[in-house]
Image (cartoon, rainbow, N blue to C red):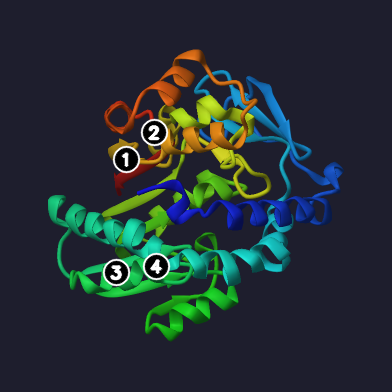
């Protein structure tokens, strides 16, 4: 998989431009922003890492998680996702144009993985599945094809996306997972892909995932992690560090602390990301004046795909890619 297959440069840059204008419109009232401690380990010992589009990104001195503080309130964030031009652009232009590439490269392998995990950890039949932040329902379509799941639920607060899932025949709970009560839904497996980095309160989200799980059930989530090479190298120049969307980049160590604090049993925290080197090389081409560590510059300019592939495998094996996966049990 290559970065531009799932994130075509021109389209993604257009999205980031619209987002910048949205930041002025939706997040100008900084006096309403709230200071938070580290979303992973709760430490208040932090230092300013950098500012980007008026948002302050801070690094936790304990677990090295990178996060925005002070941050917009939950209501401001919710209003942004509901009413902003960039959300509309993502839903109507960006996602549809990349949907099939994403189905092949991301959603199909995810469904295969979830299917494999429920078998490996012997989740008892019948196995029900919920996806928190189901979006267009493509993961659930692929999950359905495995034939493993007796019942499938899309948890999706956005009315348009909820309708999209409904039209695909899924049972839809049209609200945020945080608003679902324990007696409303109980499932064997709850997934959430690329949601945690967007949230005001990651801990509340994970506790909400746990609440709808049956005892022994699996929680599977993916998120961006600051432990990854492309984020460490590109830092404030990374396109992934884009306010207001991405405000939490938990370190691998921070993810572990958070999962444990939420009362879940960690089964696996890994970084199976495939794109770190590709993203760094693309950024260097796009920004010729970009300063990167000399070692990285040497590899990017003088070595070829074989070295890149081996380095990416090293990152995966050592929890050093920026795409993290957490598997935990209730
Ligand atoms: Zn921390």
Mark before the other along the chain sequence, 2 or 1? 1
Ligand 1 within 8 Å of disc 3? The answer is no
- Closer to the camera, 42 or 303? 303
**Mark 4 to mark 3 CA distance (whole Å):** 12 Å
Identify residue for label 1: 272
Q: Residue furthest top?
A: 294
Marker disc for residue 240: none
Query: Callout 2: helix, strand or loop?
Result: loop
- Mark nearer the viewer, 1 or 4: 4
At horizontal 33% and vertical 51% (from top left) the residue drawn is: 220
Whether label 3 touches label 2, CB < 8 Å:
no
Task: Say above or below: 274 vs 115.
Answer: above
Disc assigned to residue 100: 4
Residue 243 x %, y %: 67, 45
Judging by the rendered image, the residue that carries numbered circle 3 is 142
Position of 330 with respect to 62 (left or right) is left
Q: Which residue is mark 2?
A: 321
Q: Are the residues flagged by discs 1 and 3 in contact, CB closer than 8 Å?
A: no
Is residue 184 among what the camera can see?
A: no
29 lies above or below 156 = above
**Residue 272 in picture, x, y percent from top left:** 32, 40
């Amino acid at each position: 998989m290559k970065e531009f297959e799932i994130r075509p440069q021109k389209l993604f840059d257009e999205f980031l431009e619209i987002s910048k204008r949205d930041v002025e419109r939706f997040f100008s009232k900084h006096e309403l922003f709230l200071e938070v401690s580290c979303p992973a380990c709760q430490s208040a010992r932090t230092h300013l890492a950098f500012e980007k589009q008026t948002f302050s990104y801070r690094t936790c001195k304990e677990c090295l998680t990178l996060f925005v503080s002070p941050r917009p309130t939950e209501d401001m964030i919710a209003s942004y996702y509901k009413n902003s031009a960039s959300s509309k652009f993502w839903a109507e232009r960006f996602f549809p144009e990349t949907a099939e590439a994403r189905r092949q490269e991301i959603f199909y392998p995810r469904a295969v993985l979830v299917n494999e995990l429920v078998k490996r950890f012997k989740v008892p039949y019948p196995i029900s599945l919920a996806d928190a932040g189901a979006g267009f329902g493509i993961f659930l379509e692929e999950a359905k094809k495995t034939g493993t799941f007796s019942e499938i639920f899309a948890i999706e607060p956005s009315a348009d996306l909820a309708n999209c899932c409904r039209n695909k025949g899924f049972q839809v709970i049209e609200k945020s997972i945080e608003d679902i009560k324990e007696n409303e839904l109980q499932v064997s497996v709850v997934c959430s892909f690329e949601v945690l980095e967007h949230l005001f309160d990651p801990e509340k989200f994970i506790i909400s995932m746990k609440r709808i799980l049956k005892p022994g059930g699996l929680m599977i989530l993916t998120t961006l992690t600051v432990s990854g090479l492309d984020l460490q190298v590109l830092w404030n120049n990374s396109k992934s560090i884009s306010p207001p969307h991405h405000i939490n980049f938990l370190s691998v160590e921070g993810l572990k602390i958070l999962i444990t604090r939420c009362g879940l049993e960690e089964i696996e925290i890994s970084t199976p990301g495939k794109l770190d080197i590709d993203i760094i090389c693309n950024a260097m081409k796009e920004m010729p004046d970009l300063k990167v560590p000399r070692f990285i510059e040497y590899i990017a300019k003088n070595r070829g795909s074989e070295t890149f592939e081996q380095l990416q495998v090293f990152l995966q094996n050592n929890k050093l890619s920026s795409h993290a996966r957490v598997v935990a049990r209730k």
